[in-house]
Image (spheres, helix red, strand yellow):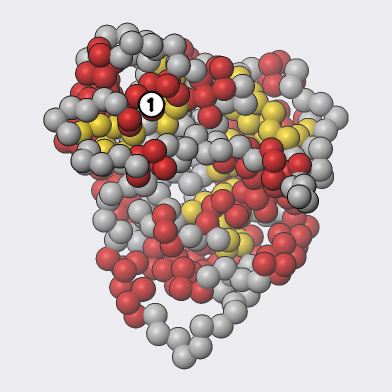
Amino acid sequence: MPRLSHRADSLQESAIRKLDLTVRLQHGVTFHRLNIGQPDVATPAPLLDAIASWRPRVIAYGPASGTPEVREAAAAYHARWSPGLSAADVVATTGGSEALLFAFTSVCDPGDEVLVPEPYYTNYNGFGTVAGAHIRPIPTHLEDGFAIPSDEVLDGLVTPRTRALVFSNPGNPTGAVTGRAELQRVLDWAARHDLFVIADEVYRRIWFREAPPSALEFDAHRDRVIVIDSLSKTYSACGIRLGFLLSRNGRLMEKIERLGQARLGPQPLAQAVGVAALQMPEAYYETIRQTYRERVAVMMDALAEIPGVSAPRPEGAFYTMVHLPVNDTEHFARYLVETHRSDGESVVVAPGGGFYAEPERGRQQIRLAAVTEAASIRRAVQIIGEALAAYDG
C-alpha cells in the first residue's frame, strides 16, 4: 500500500470536534454543546438579505484576492482604527482558516518555527503542519490569566528557525485580552528578533472591559504585522466561510496574491455577504458584546458554585479554560457523553489537552464556549457539577 506523507500522518485530531462521532452514536439524550464556537445568535438580517438577493447570470470565477467591493469594504471597516488602510492591504480568503494557512505558508519554509502562547487554538497545529512549519509553544498559566510572559522568557524560545509569533486577541481558548501596552511590548520584542507577528483578531469586536487594539494600529511595525479576520463569530456566519488577511507589507501581499491564484478566487456569494456584514452600524457590535457579556457572566457564576473548579473570567471572546478536580478531562468528557445523564440531558466539552503541544499540561482542563442561550449555559454547567460529584476518576 502506498505510504502517506509525513504531513498527513502528523496532522492532529481536533480537540474541539473529536467527540462528534461519539455524540452522534448516542440516542435519547439532549446535549448542551459547549465544545465548539458555533453561536446560536441569529445571523443579522442584512447578511441573509444579501444571500436572498444574489442572482448572478453566471456564477463565475472572481479575482484571486477577492472582489474589489469586499476588499474596499474590509479596508474601510478596519480603517476605523487603522487610518490609511486601502484595498491593496486586504485579501479575501475562504474563512480565517485559509488566511492563517496563507500567512504560515508565506513566512515559513519547511522546518521553520512559529511561536504561539499556549494554550492555543488547536487548528494552529494543523495549519503549521500543512505549511511544513513547527508550532513552538510559549507556556502561559491559568493562575495569572494566561498573560504573555516577559521578554526574557520569550528570548529563550527563539531559535535560528523562528519566523513568526502568532496569537489570538481576544484569546481562543482563554478569553484573555492583550491590551495596548502589552501589544506594543510584543511588537517591539518581535522587531528586535526580526519576526513577523500574525495577530488573529477574529474575536476583536467581542470584549467586556477594554477594547483590544488591532496590531494594524502600530504603524512603526507595518512591515511585520499580519492580521487575520473573519465573518464567522462577530456576525454569527460561520458557514459562509469568508475571512481576510490584512497587511501593509506590499511584498508579502504580492506573494499572498500568488497563493490565491493557485486556488483561484474565494466564493463570490460569501463576498457579497461580506460587504453587507462590514457595513453594519456600530450599534450592532454593542448588542453582540452585551449578548456575550451576559452569557459569559452566567457561565462564570455557575462555575463558581462547583467545588474544586477554577477558571479565569474571560475579558473577551466567549471561551474560558476551566480547571476540574479530575485526573483526566479526556476521560471525563467521554463520561459526560457516553454515561452521565441528568433528566435525559448531558454536555459536550472540549478536553484541554488538545490546546497544548504537550497534552499533559491540559490534562485537568476543559474549554467551554458560551455560545448558547443563558438558560442552556446555566443548565449545562449544573450538569457538569452533577457529573463531577458522580464521577469516579
Write down the residue under mark 1.
333
Q: Secondary structure at mark 1?
A: helix
Q: Is residue 73 left or right of residue 197?
A: left
Q: Is residue 234 left or right of residue 166?
A: left
Look at 22% across and 18% down and name the residue there.
386
**Kind of residue at badge 1:** Ala
**In terms of image quadrants, where is residue 335?**
top left
Compared to residue 362, the image places residue 297 above or below, namely below
Residue furthest bottom in the image: 57
Q: Position of residue 358 (x, y in %)?
A: 61, 21
Compared to residue 332, the image places residue 374 above or below, namely below
Look at 26% across and 19% down and name the residue there.
387
Look at 31% across and 69% down and name the residue there.
48
Q: Position of residue 157 (x, y in %)?
A: 74, 22
Residue 30 seen by the camera: no
Look at 42% across and 42% down and name the residue there.
21
Name the foreground residue: 360 vs 236: 360
Q: Position of residue 38 (x, y in %)?
A: 36, 47
